[in-house]
């Protein structure tokens, strides 16, 4: 079984990567970052630093993308103005609520801009499957996802047992690591 670290370049997944670089966790066979092409500049700077640290430990970070979420949002707005309205995966917009608090509009972009690109990576790069080729019946990929204690509710096993929460459920088993946060501050700076 191949092990893939799903890297978002946040504290949790960065911690997993850096622990693997230090030999405190087993090295993953693959590390993948799914790029929306509209991340904050700090994320890209941190990702470059992570790539340098990973390279020192013999780990390569692969980047996948399905395109620019910003360009797609602008194109959707233009199409909508012409009455050509098709479904669009909305991105997170921050708003001021009526009571003065801050909130975020619902979003559906994770599936289209992150998960689908990573699923394709699992199938094509990790397993070497061609389009339309069946995945193995038994899980063949273990996905590492960093989740902190305050997000523990996200660490539920996917429906149907210990398989990926993504659509190609037979392809992946999910291994989630719930940290106590004791490593978080150690890796936020350089």
Image (spheres, rainbow, N blue to C red):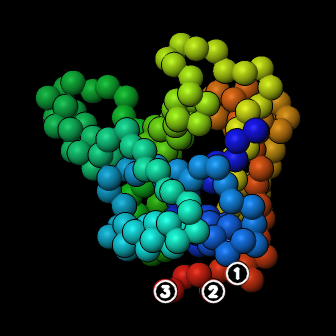
- In the rendered image, residue 23, in percent from the top left (x then y), is placed at 72, 71
Secondary structure of the residue carrying tag 2 is helix
Q: At 50% across and 66% down in the image, what residue appears?
A: 55
N-terminal of the pair, mark 3 or mark 1, is 1
Q: Nearer the viewer, residue 98 or 47?
A: 47
Neighbourhood count class around disc 3 (C-alpha, 10 Å): few under 14, some 14–19, many 20 upward: few
Disc ID at residue 186: 2
Q: CA distance from mark 1 to mark 2?
A: 5 Å
* As drawn, 39 above or below 165: below
Q: Position of residue 91 (x, y in %)?
A: 40, 49
Is 72 above or below relative to 134?
Answer: below
Numbered disc 1: secondary structure: loop
Tell me the distance, in whole angstroms, between the alpha carbons under discs 3 and 2: 9 Å
Which of the two residues, 182 or 82, is positioned nearer the viewer here? 182
The residue lying at 64 percent from left, 27 percent from top is: 168
Q: Give the quadrant of the N terminus.
A: top right
Residue 162 % position (x, y): 83, 39
Residue 20 occupies quadrant: bottom right
Residue at the far right in the pictured view: 161
Asked if marks 1 and 2 touch (Cβ < 8 Å), the reply is: yes
Residue that carries the numbered disc 1 in the rendered image: 183
Q: Is residue 85 left or right of residue 102?
A: left
**Position of residue 56 in the picture relative to residue 135 (left or right):** left
Picture disc at residue 7: none
Residue indicated by mark 3: 190
The residue carrying pointer 2 sits among few (fewer than 14), some (14 to 19) or many (20 or more) residues within 10 Å by Cα, namely few
Residue at position x 76%, y 72% in the image = 24
Residue 177, can we see it? yes
């Amino acid at each position: 079984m191949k092990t893939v670290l799903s890297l978002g370049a946040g504290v949790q997944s960065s911690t997993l990567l850096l622990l693997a670089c230090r030999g405190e966790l087993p090295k993953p066979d693959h590390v993948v970052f799914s790029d929306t092409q509209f991340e904050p500049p700090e994320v890209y700077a941190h990702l470059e630093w992570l790539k340098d640290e990973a390279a020192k430990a013999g780990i390569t970070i692969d980047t996948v993308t399905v395109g620019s979420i910003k360009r797609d949002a602008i194109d959707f707005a233009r199409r909508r103005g012409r009455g050509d309205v098709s479904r669009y995966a909305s991105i997170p917009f921050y708003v001021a609520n009526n009571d003065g608090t801050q909130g975020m509009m619902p979003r559906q972009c994770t599936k289209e801009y992150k998960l689908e690109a990573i699923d394709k990576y699992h199938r094509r790069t990790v397993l070497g499957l061609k389009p339309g080729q069946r995945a193995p019946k038994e899980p063949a990929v273990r996905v590492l996802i960093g989740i902190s204690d305050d997000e523990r509710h996200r660490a539920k096993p996917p429906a149907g047992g210990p398989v990926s929460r993504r659509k190609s459920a037979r392809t992946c088993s999910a291994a989630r690591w719930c940290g106590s946060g004791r490593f978080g501050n150690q890796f936020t700076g350089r």
